[in-house]
């Protein structure tokens, strides 16, 4: 484990002892001209869960992260039974040069009694985090964005977390209409940071994945696949689809 990622994990564990929270930790595909396909700066197909790349940090209880293979495909399965663990990887880059974060996800079970604006209900069936290199040594001093599949809130909603650091949560998928279906998401980090915080974003230091249900003492099941960081908007919606 690199020194920086070790420090990141230590921060998460320290914060978990103080308060359970998603710590500090993207429109859908944009229209217009046909996107240019470039080699990703970062890609995770989840053929395996590489412990040298991804670290699991338990916050309250445990979310199980495993590789599930079906019909010749491998995906990350997250199963939370009243628990919360974050899957974290260090990725350092300038979002001015690599603007796009994309991934695919599928939610099989939504969190019950979700209320993202309150500590008692701040669980989500699926989240993707982006952590920024802002001043401060402790995680709640960092800025972060969380992309959320919400059980109730409409797409486009931005919620401020009730936990220390007050990261911003952006709802990019909502409700049970697409439950059990793979959905492709592509977000422009510069645009979203402007919406959440104003101004241009600092460098990204890490990304994370979490399915959590500890506050609501419920259950949630989600799958994740093909996480990418690219310079241009990646491919087209059909290219990101999964069966």
Image (cartoon, rainbow, N blue to C red):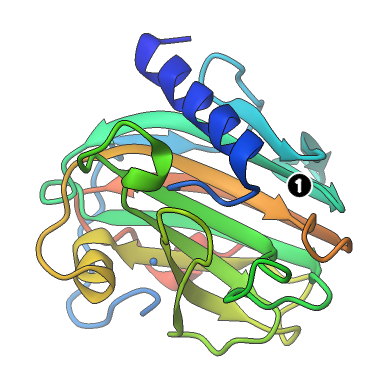
- Is residue 235 shown above or below 178? above
Q: Which of the 4 quarters of the picture holds residue 154? A: bottom right
Residue 106 location in percent, x, y?
69, 63
Residue 129 location in percent, x, y?
46, 51
- Asked if one can make out residue 243 in the rendered structure from this viewpoint, the answer is no
- To which residue does mark 1 refer? 78
Residue 211 location in percent, x, y?
70, 53
- Asked if one can make out residue 186 in the rendered structure from this viewpoint, the answer is yes
Please, which residue is most extreme toward the front here?
Answer: 18
Q: Residue at x 40, y 54 (%)?
A: 165
Q: Is residue 133 left or right of residue 228?
A: left
Residue 198 location in percent, x, y?
16, 70
Depth check: give the residue in front, 234 or 114.
Answer: 114
Q: Residue at x 31, y 31 (%)?
A: 137
Q: Secondary structure at mark 1?
A: strand
- The C terminus - image quarter: bottom right
């Amino acid at each position: 484990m690199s020194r920086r990622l070790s420090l990141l994990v230590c921060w998460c564990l320290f914060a978990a002892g103080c308060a359970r929270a998603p710590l500090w930790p993207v429109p859908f595909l944009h229209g217009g001209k046909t996107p240019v396909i470039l080699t990703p700066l970062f890609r995770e197909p989840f053929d395996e869960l590489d412990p040298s790349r991804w670290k699991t940090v338990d916050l309250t209880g445990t979310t199980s992260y495993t590789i599930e293979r079906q019909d010749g495909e491998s995906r990350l399965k997250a199963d939370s039974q009243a628990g919360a663990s974050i899957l974290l990887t260090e990725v350092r880059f300038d979002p001015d040069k690599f603007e796009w974060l994309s991934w695919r996800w599928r939610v099989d079970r939504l969190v019950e009694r979700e209320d993202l604006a309150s500590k008692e209900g701040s669980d989500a069936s699926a989240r993707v985090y982006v952590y920024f290199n802002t001043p401060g040594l402790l995680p709640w001093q960092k800025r972060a964005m969380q992309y959320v599949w919400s059980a109730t809130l409409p797409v486009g909603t931005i919620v401020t977390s009730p936990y220390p650091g007050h990261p911003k949560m952006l709802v990019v998928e909502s409700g049970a209409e697409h439950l059990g279906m793979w959905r492709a998401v592509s977000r422009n980090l510069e645009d979203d940071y402007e919406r959440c915080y104003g101004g241009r974003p600092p460098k990204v230091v890490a990304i994370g994945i979490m399915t959590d249900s500890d506050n609501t003492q419920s259950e949630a099941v989600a799958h994740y696949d093909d996480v990418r960081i690219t310079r241009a908007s990646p491919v087209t919606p059909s290219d990101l689809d999964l069966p």
